[in-house]
Image (cartoon, grey):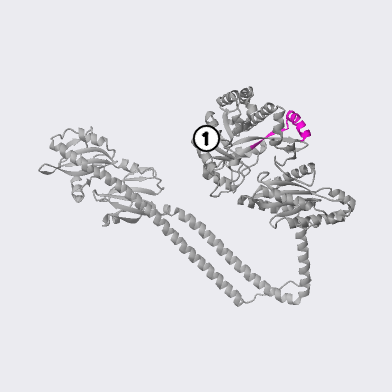
Amino acid sequence: MSPPLERNVIALSSLQGSLIALALMVIIGTWIFAGYQLGLSRDKILEEHTKTLTNLSLVVSENINQVLDRTRAMKVLSRMQLLKRQSHDPGTLAALIGSDPAFSRITLITHSGETLLSTSPGPLPALHPEWKTLLTQQERWPIRVLPTTTLGESWSVPLVMPLEVGQEDNCCLLVLDMDMGYLLSLYQNLKLGRETSIHIATAQGVELLRAERGGLIAGASGFDDTVVLKSRLSQGRVVSRHPQNRRDYLGYFVKLEQAPFVIQVRQSELEALATYHQQRNKYLASVIVMTLIAIGGLFWLLWVMHGREVQMRELQKSEQRNTKLLKRLRREHQDTIEAASRDHLTGLYNRRLFIELAHSQLLGSKRQGRFAAICFIDLDRFKTINDTLGHKVGDNLLQEVARRLRETLRESDIISRFGGDEFVAMLTAVKHQEDVEAKVQQLVEVLAAPYPELEAAGLGTSPSIGVAISPRDGLDIETLVKHADMAMYRAKKAGRGRYCLFDSHGNPHASGDADLQFEVANALQRGEFRVHYQPRLRLRGYETTGFEALLRWESPEYGLILPDTFLPWLEAEKLMPQLTRSVLEQVGRQLKEWREQGLTPLPIAVNVNSAQLSETALPGQVRNLIETNRLDPGWLELEVGDQDLRRLDAEAIEHLQLVRQQGVGLVMDDFGASEEGLELVSRLSFKRIKLSRALIQHIRNSFDDNVLLSATISVARKQNLSVVAKGVETPDQLVYLKLAGCQEAQGFLFSRALEPDAVKDYLLTPKRKVTL
């Protein structure tokens, strides 16, 4: 055992001193820059709020000026009425007041305070004792103002104008009660802040009224307006402090020329800078974190440098021992990593590391709007080769297969060996499904090529490959691997040395397997046909609006079988009415179960074809389903395809109308597949249409995308129809559909068809998070 390393306290070297100086300069510079940026941000926000206050004060002053302009007309009518000696007939002035909500009363009074005429039916209170003094102080304005209490109205401001009649100057005074509450109520709906207000005061500093977020308030607000009143400017900015809360308020004032009014709009600086304070706190927090990181990094670097100096002295004493130790540790570490992430025989990734890498690649393909494919590869007759030629030949064969896979696939593709003769490869960032099929066919040919060691013994092997494509066949790696495994077994059963896609087009059962077709009737009796539910989301907010009932045959012997395989057999056996009854019963029980669990059911669309609609019993089945399960009819929808609608006779259309009269919604599927679609929609009361897959499958979100799709959506919306896009699989399709005005969508980009238990999450949390 060697003695522990010594850590002597040594003086700072010139390099360490330089690093400390550089770090301090960076930290100081960062804080200076942060302070400068915060100052700029604060000034900018204050400038923006000041502009807002300026605009608002100018708007209010302009509105009051417009009201004051109308007093001239009233002054002319009053003079005419006095000239005609109709001082006791207020009819004309009362009509004028009734048409102008800004004024509540017109009064003609003498200089001694005697009332000559008034549009108010009630008695008038006595004038304020100091009213003559106030009028004298306001001689420079054409329109003068008396206190709000002069005529006994706190919400009205008396406006006074001298009135000349004939040769008599200032024979009397015209008093107009201006309703300030009406004027300010025009701005009450503005989104004023909690500490933002509009003030109207006289030139003598008497505050008449103010509008705040809580409403209109009469009386003084407590602000000291001495600076504003003494200012010779007609308008300008002002900063004042509230005497109670001691806060500074930004303001802008406007002095009117026609009357002794001062309009001010104020907002507390604290409220104006609320956003700035939030940004400042976040900014300062980030700067503090950066400072701490810099300081921590500096100390760590100094500590490392100090340690290295000590270690270098020790290493000179025990270089040989440490070199051997490091070599052994590196070798053990490398062996550990290789054992944990690689297959020891082929050097390929093992299952654990493949799942991790494939998961991140799948997320990348989804963001790019590309496909990803999982290829599950199994070597045919490998057990026979192992048993006949021995495990060494079998191991050599596996190594050769791994080599051929590496040479055939791209560097971006992920290749792994799950165990035995099972290999799994992931094709990443694929543009088109046809590219997947071409590459898989190449893999079949490459792996089926002769192997020299096997040829000598008269043996050979070929691959059976199952392919699952994302997002169509699954949204996660585990599901894709499972489906690719299922497709691989179907490829083996179809004859080996080939590949099989996990979908209806690549399903070997679609070829018309006699045993499977014979089982379809028994499967219906045994209840092997199960309803899965694919969510439908509103594109604005991504909230779940309903589901489509999709049928699956869960065969104990053949696994999961898709509708395109078994529906033609059911139609040939004339079992569609029985199937419809089964689907409706499952949907009805499921809706009832959700309701009893306290969940709020969403509408479920059930697909029906022309043969099912021709059944006389269909309307009765729907009515019985609703009554038996005590369902809201709006929870059920019937979805009819474009082609089926064109084949409907008069009786089937009548059945459809009877179902619609029960409150069940009608949905037209594959809209846009034919020219007759719009005519059929106008004849029947459809509430929703689903766009044909052909309209969206080639969308790449470019300038030359489907113009027909945009036109179809526009026409449908003008018919007051809700538009749904189905089969949405890529972010490009989603972006284009939203811009084109499509309202709802469903597809593998959001979710595959779910079993009933998995649907509960969508009912509990309808609003979903969609990752693009």
Q: Which residue is mark 1?
A: 721
The amino acid type of the residue labelled 1 equals Leu
Give the image location of residue 333, x and y in percent: 76, 63
Residue found at x 82% / y 48%: 380
Up/down of 22 relative to 683, above or below: below
Q: Quadrant of residue 484?
A: top right
Residue 686 seen by the camera: no
Q: Quadrant of residue 97?
A: top left
> Does the segment drawn in magenta span residue 531?
yes
Residue found at x 30% / y 50%: 263
Q: Specify the farthest residue to the left.
A: 167
Residue 46 seen by the camera: yes
Give the image location of residue 434, x and y in percent: 67, 48
Q: Secondary structure at mark 1?
A: loop
Left or right: 497 in relation to 748: right
Left or right: 390 in relation to 98: right
> Does the segment drawn in magenta span residue 523?
yes
Question: Magenta stretch mostly in which secondary structure?
Answer: helix
Nearer to the camera, 286 or 401: 401
Up/down of 29 relative to 235, above or below: below
Q: Which residues are magenta?
A: 513-533
